[in-house]
Image (tube, grey):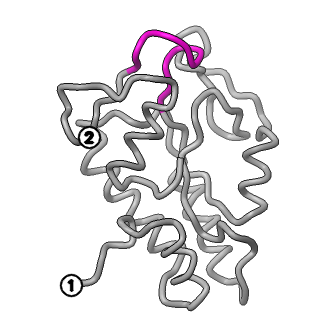
Amino acid sequence: MAKSPNKLSASEAVLRMAQKRLKARDLVEACLDRIEHREGQVHAWEALDPEGARKRADVLDKRARPVGPLHGIPLAVKDIISTKVMPTTCGSPIYRDHVVGKDAACVSQLVKAGAIVLGKSVTTEFAGGHAGKTHNPHNVRHTPAGSSSGSAAAVADFMVPVG
């Protein structure tokens, strides 16, 4: 039985896309399916942009050659990093609806390298103390804690290959 696309490593997925054995859209859909089935237990995501991710994947799939080393790879952006279309809450209720309106430089560089921003992952408040809502996907009675808790849980649970 073939490995589900969301269980591929980023390097395996990039190679398969370069060989035209995998479409970015299929990888995005596999990640979204996994999120749909597991997010209720894991709580790794602060915000998702499924339609934006699908559109970007479709554009990338039409290209004759990869745009960069992360071509077609969905990723979770930590919620202290600005994105153009999703809120950047910094894990705090005081920024619940805060939309910066532009991507941080690191996000722009990742997109330029071919990555697909799937959503914003949970972080501890202001990337400091107070564990967020995220559960360890391998033992939901525990938290991964830390400022990268959502990203770590999303990657560990095969929701995205990169965070």
- Callout 2: helix, strand or loop? loop
Query: Which residue sits at x=54%, y=73%?
Result: 24
Say which of 144 and 91 sits in front. 144
Residue 124 lies in the magenta stretch: yes
Indicate left or right for 20 with 137 as reference.
Answer: right
| Residue 137 marker | 2
Indicate left or right for 134 with 82 as reference.
Answer: left
Q: Over which residues does the magenta segment extend?
A: 122-132
The amino acid type found where label 1 is placed reads Met
Query: Which residue sits at x=45%, y=66%?
Result: 9
Indicate the position of residue 26 as horizontal and vertical percent values. 45, 74
The amino acid type found where label 2 is placed reads Pro
User: Considering only vertical position in the picture, is 72 above or below 23?
Assistant: above
| Residue 1 marker | 1
Indicate the position of residue 96 as horizontal and vertical percent values. 56, 18
Say which of 58 and 20 sits in front. 20
- Callout 1: helix, strand or loop? loop
Indicate the position of residue 5 as horizontal and vertical percent values. 39, 72
Mark 1: give few (<14), some (14-19) or many (20+) Cα within 10 Å: few
Indicate the position of residue 82 as horizontal and vertical percent values. 71, 33
